[in-house]
Image: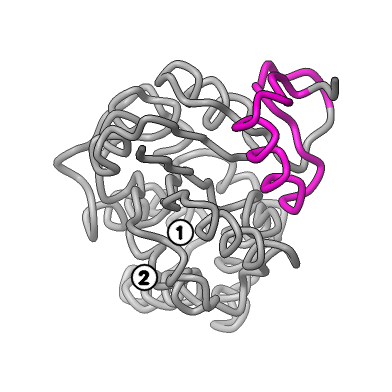
Amino acid sequence: MKKSIFWDFDGTLTYPNGGIWSGSLYKVLKDRRYDVELEKVRELMRSGYTWHRHEDSYVTNTGQKWWDNLFRHLQPFYEKHMIPQGDLENINADFKRRILSVELYTLYEDAEAVLRECGEMGYTNYILSNNFPELSLIIEGLGIAQYFADYVVSAKIGYEKPRAELFQYALSLAGSPDISYMVGDNPVADIQGGKAAGMTTILVHKDGDFNADFMCGSLSEIPLLLREAENGKRTSSKPN
Protein backbone atom coordinates (compact mmCIF):
# COMPACT_ATOMS: atom_id res chain seq x y z
CA MET A 1 0.00 0.00 0.00
CA LYS A 2 1.40 3.37 -1.03
CA LYS A 3 1.11 6.09 1.60
CA SER A 4 2.20 9.64 0.82
CA ILE A 5 2.26 12.95 2.65
CA PHE A 6 2.49 16.20 0.73
CA TRP A 7 3.92 19.05 2.79
CA ASP A 8 3.58 22.75 2.21
CA PHE A 9 6.76 24.70 3.02
CA ASP A 10 6.31 28.34 4.10
CA GLY A 11 4.26 28.58 7.27
CA THR A 12 4.08 24.80 7.59
CA LEU A 13 7.59 23.40 7.94
CA THR A 14 9.13 26.85 8.41
CA TYR A 15 7.88 29.87 10.27
CA PRO A 16 5.80 32.23 8.07
CA ASN A 17 8.10 34.34 5.91
CA GLY A 18 5.69 37.11 4.95
CA GLY A 19 8.34 39.77 5.43
CA ILE A 20 11.18 38.09 3.59
CA TRP A 21 10.34 39.34 0.10
CA SER A 22 9.68 42.96 1.01
CA GLY A 23 12.48 43.00 3.57
CA SER A 24 14.95 41.58 1.07
CA LEU A 25 14.21 44.13 -1.63
CA TYR A 26 14.24 46.94 0.92
CA LYS A 27 17.67 45.87 2.20
CA VAL A 28 19.10 45.58 -1.30
CA LEU A 29 17.89 49.08 -2.16
CA LYS A 30 19.11 50.51 1.13
CA ASP A 31 22.54 48.90 0.70
CA ARG A 32 22.76 50.65 -2.66
CA ARG A 33 21.77 53.93 -0.98
CA TYR A 34 18.34 54.27 -2.52
CA ASP A 35 15.95 55.99 -0.15
CA VAL A 36 12.72 54.01 -0.48
CA GLU A 37 10.30 53.59 2.42
CA LEU A 38 9.79 50.04 3.67
CA GLU A 39 6.02 50.46 3.58
CA LYS A 40 6.20 51.36 -0.12
CA VAL A 41 8.11 48.14 -0.76
CA ARG A 42 5.54 46.19 1.26
CA GLU A 43 2.73 47.63 -0.83
CA LEU A 44 4.54 46.52 -3.98
CA MET A 45 5.01 42.99 -2.66
CA ARG A 46 1.34 42.49 -1.81
CA SER A 47 0.70 41.64 -5.46
CA GLY A 48 2.55 40.51 -8.54
CA TYR A 49 3.49 36.97 -7.55
CA THR A 50 2.01 34.03 -9.38
CA TRP A 51 0.45 32.76 -6.13
CA HIS A 52 -1.60 35.96 -6.04
CA ARG A 53 -3.17 34.89 -9.36
CA HIS A 54 -3.66 31.16 -8.90
CA GLU A 55 -6.43 31.18 -11.51
CA ASP A 56 -3.76 31.81 -14.17
CA SER A 57 -1.50 29.11 -15.57
CA TYR A 58 2.03 29.89 -16.79
CA VAL A 59 3.46 26.59 -18.01
CA THR A 60 5.68 28.36 -20.55
CA ASN A 61 7.08 30.79 -17.99
CA THR A 62 8.66 28.55 -15.38
CA GLY A 63 12.20 28.39 -14.03
CA GLN A 64 14.25 31.51 -14.77
CA LYS A 65 11.34 32.92 -16.77
CA TRP A 66 9.39 32.99 -13.50
CA TRP A 67 12.00 35.32 -12.06
CA ASP A 68 12.10 37.40 -15.24
CA ASN A 69 8.34 38.01 -14.99
CA LEU A 70 8.71 39.01 -11.35
CA PHE A 71 11.45 41.47 -12.23
CA ARG A 72 9.18 42.96 -14.90
CA HIS A 73 6.58 43.49 -12.19
CA LEU A 74 9.18 45.49 -10.24
CA GLN A 75 10.10 47.70 -13.21
CA PRO A 76 7.40 50.41 -12.73
CA PHE A 77 8.34 50.62 -9.05
CA TYR A 78 11.97 51.23 -9.94
CA GLU A 79 10.99 53.89 -12.45
CA LYS A 80 8.68 55.62 -9.96
CA HIS A 81 11.51 55.88 -7.46
CA MET A 82 13.99 57.05 -10.10
CA ILE A 83 16.32 54.07 -9.82
CA PRO A 84 18.64 54.10 -12.86
CA GLN A 85 18.03 51.46 -15.53
CA GLY A 86 21.73 50.61 -15.52
CA ASP A 87 21.56 49.45 -11.91
CA LEU A 88 18.51 47.21 -12.22
CA GLU A 89 20.31 44.04 -13.30
CA ASN A 90 22.52 44.16 -10.22
CA ILE A 91 19.60 45.01 -7.93
CA ASN A 92 17.54 42.10 -9.24
CA ALA A 93 20.49 39.74 -8.94
CA ASP A 94 21.11 40.82 -5.34
CA PHE A 95 17.40 40.49 -4.55
CA LYS A 96 17.23 36.96 -5.93
CA ARG A 97 20.47 36.00 -4.17
CA ARG A 98 19.06 37.17 -0.86
CA ILE A 99 15.77 35.29 -1.32
CA LEU A 100 17.85 32.15 -1.93
CA SER A 101 19.82 32.62 1.31
CA VAL A 102 18.99 29.71 3.57
CA GLU A 103 19.62 31.89 6.63
CA LEU A 104 16.29 33.63 6.03
CA TYR A 105 14.29 30.47 6.68
CA THR A 106 13.68 28.92 10.10
CA LEU A 107 12.33 25.41 10.59
CA TYR A 108 9.75 24.74 13.23
CA GLU A 109 11.54 23.00 16.06
CA ASP A 110 9.64 19.74 15.58
CA ALA A 111 9.75 19.66 11.76
CA GLU A 112 12.72 17.35 11.23
CA ALA A 113 11.69 14.85 13.90
CA VAL A 114 8.16 14.65 12.49
CA LEU A 115 9.36 14.14 8.91
CA ARG A 116 11.66 11.38 10.10
CA GLU A 117 8.92 9.67 12.11
CA CYS A 118 6.42 9.83 9.25
CA GLY A 119 9.00 8.17 7.01
CA GLU A 120 9.57 5.45 9.60
CA MET A 121 5.80 4.86 9.63
CA GLY A 122 5.89 4.02 5.93
CA TYR A 123 4.82 7.34 4.49
CA THR A 124 6.70 8.87 1.56
CA ASN A 125 7.18 12.61 2.03
CA TYR A 126 6.88 15.14 -0.79
CA ILE A 127 7.05 18.92 -0.90
CA LEU A 128 4.03 20.57 -2.54
CA SER A 129 4.57 24.32 -2.45
CA ASN A 130 3.68 27.57 -4.17
CA ASN A 131 7.19 28.90 -4.36
CA PHE A 132 10.22 29.96 -6.39
CA PRO A 133 11.94 27.38 -8.65
CA GLU A 134 15.01 26.83 -6.45
CA LEU A 135 13.10 25.82 -3.30
CA SER A 136 14.91 22.48 -3.16
CA LEU A 137 18.18 24.36 -2.53
CA ILE A 138 16.68 25.92 0.60
CA ILE A 139 15.45 22.54 1.80
CA GLU A 140 18.89 21.07 1.26
CA GLY A 141 20.45 23.97 3.13
CA LEU A 142 18.09 23.42 6.06
CA GLY A 143 19.30 19.83 6.32
CA ILE A 144 15.99 18.06 5.66
CA ALA A 145 16.31 17.04 2.00
CA GLN A 146 16.87 13.40 2.94
CA TYR A 147 13.29 13.12 4.16
CA PHE A 148 11.71 13.92 0.79
CA ALA A 149 11.31 11.70 -2.23
CA ASP A 150 10.70 14.65 -4.55
CA TYR A 151 9.51 18.26 -4.84
CA VAL A 152 6.46 19.73 -6.54
CA VAL A 153 7.03 23.48 -6.77
CA SER A 154 4.62 25.77 -8.58
CA ALA A 155 7.25 27.92 -10.31
CA LYS A 156 8.71 24.79 -11.93
CA ILE A 157 5.34 23.40 -13.05
CA GLY A 158 3.33 26.49 -14.02
CA TYR A 159 0.31 26.09 -11.73
CA GLU A 160 -0.37 27.35 -8.22
CA LYS A 161 -2.29 25.68 -5.42
CA PRO A 162 -5.25 25.27 -5.21
CA ARG A 163 -5.24 24.53 -8.96
CA ALA A 164 -6.23 20.93 -9.60
CA GLU A 165 -3.44 20.50 -12.15
CA LEU A 166 -0.73 20.94 -9.51
CA PHE A 167 -2.29 18.39 -7.18
CA GLN A 168 -2.82 15.95 -10.04
CA TYR A 169 0.82 16.34 -10.99
CA ALA A 170 1.85 15.63 -7.39
CA LEU A 171 -0.32 12.54 -7.08
CA SER A 172 0.95 11.21 -10.39
CA LEU A 173 4.55 11.81 -9.32
CA ALA A 174 3.85 9.81 -6.16
CA GLY A 175 2.46 6.91 -8.18
CA SER A 176 -1.20 7.48 -7.32
CA PRO A 177 -0.89 6.55 -3.63
CA ASP A 178 -3.64 4.62 -1.86
CA ILE A 179 -3.46 7.04 1.08
CA SER A 180 -2.51 10.68 0.61
CA TYR A 181 -2.38 13.57 3.05
CA MET A 182 -1.95 17.27 2.38
CA VAL A 183 -0.38 19.15 5.30
CA GLY A 184 -0.42 22.94 5.19
CA ASP A 185 -1.30 26.20 6.89
CA ASN A 186 -3.34 27.82 4.13
CA PRO A 187 -7.10 27.06 4.25
CA VAL A 188 -7.52 27.76 0.54
CA ALA A 189 -4.32 26.69 -1.20
CA ASP A 190 -3.65 23.63 0.96
CA ILE A 191 -6.98 22.56 2.43
CA GLN A 192 -9.49 23.40 -0.30
CA GLY A 193 -7.04 22.33 -2.97
CA GLY A 194 -6.15 19.09 -1.20
CA LYS A 195 -9.74 18.13 -0.50
CA ALA A 196 -10.75 18.78 -4.10
CA ALA A 197 -7.94 16.45 -5.20
CA GLY A 198 -9.22 13.68 -2.92
CA MET A 199 -6.50 14.04 -0.29
CA THR A 200 -7.05 13.90 3.44
CA THR A 201 -6.15 17.35 4.72
CA ILE A 202 -4.32 18.45 7.88
CA LEU A 203 -4.31 22.14 8.77
CA VAL A 204 -1.46 23.18 11.05
CA HIS A 205 -0.61 26.27 13.09
CA LYS A 206 -4.11 27.74 12.70
CA ASP A 207 -7.17 28.18 14.92
CA GLY A 208 -10.70 28.22 13.57
CA ASP A 209 -13.08 26.15 11.47
CA PHE A 210 -11.50 25.86 8.04
CA ASN A 211 -13.11 22.60 6.88
CA ALA A 212 -9.90 20.58 7.16
CA ASP A 213 -10.21 16.87 7.90
CA PHE A 214 -7.81 17.32 10.81
CA MET A 215 -6.32 20.27 12.65
CA CYS A 216 -3.05 20.27 14.57
CA GLY A 217 -1.63 23.07 16.66
CA SER A 218 1.87 21.75 16.03
CA LEU A 219 3.58 19.37 13.64
CA SER A 220 4.43 17.04 16.53
CA GLU A 221 0.75 16.04 16.76
CA ILE A 222 0.73 14.55 13.26
CA PRO A 223 2.34 11.11 13.82
CA LEU A 224 -0.18 10.20 16.55
CA LEU A 225 -3.00 11.48 14.38
CA LEU A 226 -1.85 9.23 11.53
CA ARG A 227 -1.65 6.20 13.81
CA GLU A 228 -5.12 6.81 15.21
CA ALA A 229 -6.55 7.36 11.72
CA GLU A 230 -5.01 4.08 10.52
CA ASN A 231 -6.52 2.27 13.50
CA GLY A 232 -9.92 3.88 13.01
CA LYS A 233 -9.71 5.82 16.26
CA ARG A 234 -9.64 9.26 14.63
CA THR A 235 -12.08 10.19 11.88
CA SER A 236 -12.15 13.98 12.16
CA SER A 237 -10.28 16.93 13.58
CA LYS A 238 -12.28 16.71 16.78
CA PRO A 239 -11.15 14.20 19.44
CA ASN A 240 -13.53 11.34 20.11
User: If the image is split into quadrants, where does the N terminus sit?
Assistant: top left
Looking at the rendered structure, the number of numbered marks drawn on it comes to 2
State the image coordinates of residue 69 (x, y, percent, origin top left).
29, 49
**Mark number, residue 88:** 2
Up-down: is 158 above or below 165? below
Q: Which residues are magenta?
A: 208-237
State which tag comes first along the sequence, 1 or 2. Answer: 1
Residue positioned 57% across, 64% down in the render: 116
Residue at 66% of width from left, 24% of height from top?
A: 232
Q: Quadrant of residue 43?
A: top right
Reading the image, the residue beneath label 1 is: 78
- CB under 8 Å between callouts 1 and 2? yes
The residue located at (44%, 70%) in the rendering is 145
Foreground residue among 190 and 75: 190
Q: Amino acid at mark 2?
A: Leu
Compute the Cα span from label 1 to label 2. 8 Å
Name the kind of residue labelled 1 in the image.
Tyr
Above or below 144: residue 161: above
Crowding near the residue tagged with mark 2, few <14, some 14–19, many ≥20 C-alpha atoms within 10 Å: some
